[in-house]
Amino acid sequence: MPGSEMVMSPRHFFALVNVPLWIGLLVTSCHHVADPPPPPIGVYPLNEAELIGQLKTAYQKRDYDTFKRLFHADYQFYLNQAQPDGTTHWGLSEELRIHRRMFRPHAVQPPESPVPQELWLVSVDITLTAFVAFQDATTYYFDPTTNPTGFRRENFTVSQADYAASVFFQTQGETQYRLDGVENFVVVNDLSKTAGDDGKFLIYRWEDLGALALFANSTSTSTWTQVKSLYKW
């Protein structure tokens, strides 16, 4: 799991043998204004893989604040199969609403219906493993004929990678949810920003490709579409 540790300079201790000198240092220190703390290290991802690593961490910690800053404004989630009402995908506002209910069930306010107590999460054990490194996703770039609203190559890069996902959702109820699936993540890199800046790397598309072949016929595993859908209502 990606992350960074802040390395602090070692403190130096001096033996003070002269009492007047010690008093002088004490008086001086009383008037010293502490320097402001440095900005946190590793808050924002440095590349596409770190971005997906932060998605993993957001699920592990059920951290809605981290989760909501990982996505592009035009983000869409594509279901592995259409819902009974014909829904095949949803956008950012619905994705955030679902995860606010998933991660903060105690904070749901009317007119939304409360999250059933048996769906309140106790823990999330998650592993996301890339099949290959992120590769250029050419279909998302601007083309005057086929994609007039696409990303301009001089301003953005767009890449995608398939991940194997293994997730176990432990709830307060008797039913627990396990998924072993394949997810396709499409990430946009804003070239106007520097690595480590907020919003440089953002998830643009998340496509649930369904269960891994090993579990395709299993009745004991769910898909991410199915788990997210539990928290829609």
Image (tube, helix red, strand yellow):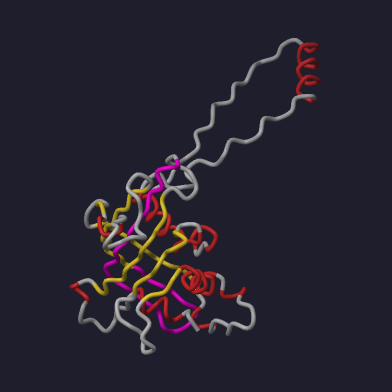
Occupied quadrant, residue 177? bottom left
Q: Is residue 118 magenta?
A: no
The residue nearer to you, when weighing 218 against 83, is: 83
Establish if 118 lies above or below 2.
Answer: below
Residue 76 lies, in percent from the top left, at 39, 68
The residue nearer to you, when weighing 9 against 40, is: 40
Residue 68 lies, in percent from the top left, at 50, 61
Q: Which residues are magenta?
A: 167-193
Residue 14 located left or right of residue 56: right
Occupied quadrant, residue 27? top right
Q: Tell me the residue at 25%/55% (across/down).
A: 138
The residue nearer to you, when weighing 183 against 23, is: 183
Count of labels shown?
0
Residue extending farthest left: 213
Q: Tell me the residue at 44%/57% (across/down).
A: 57
User: Is the magenta region chiefly helix, strand or loop?
Assistant: strand
Q: Tell me the residue at 64%/17% (across/down).
A: 14
Q: Is residue 180 magenta?
A: yes
Establish if 188 lies above or below 94.
Answer: above
Residue 196 lies, in percent from the top left, at 45, 42
Residue 79 lies, in percent from the top left, at 34, 76
Residue extending farthest bottom: 84
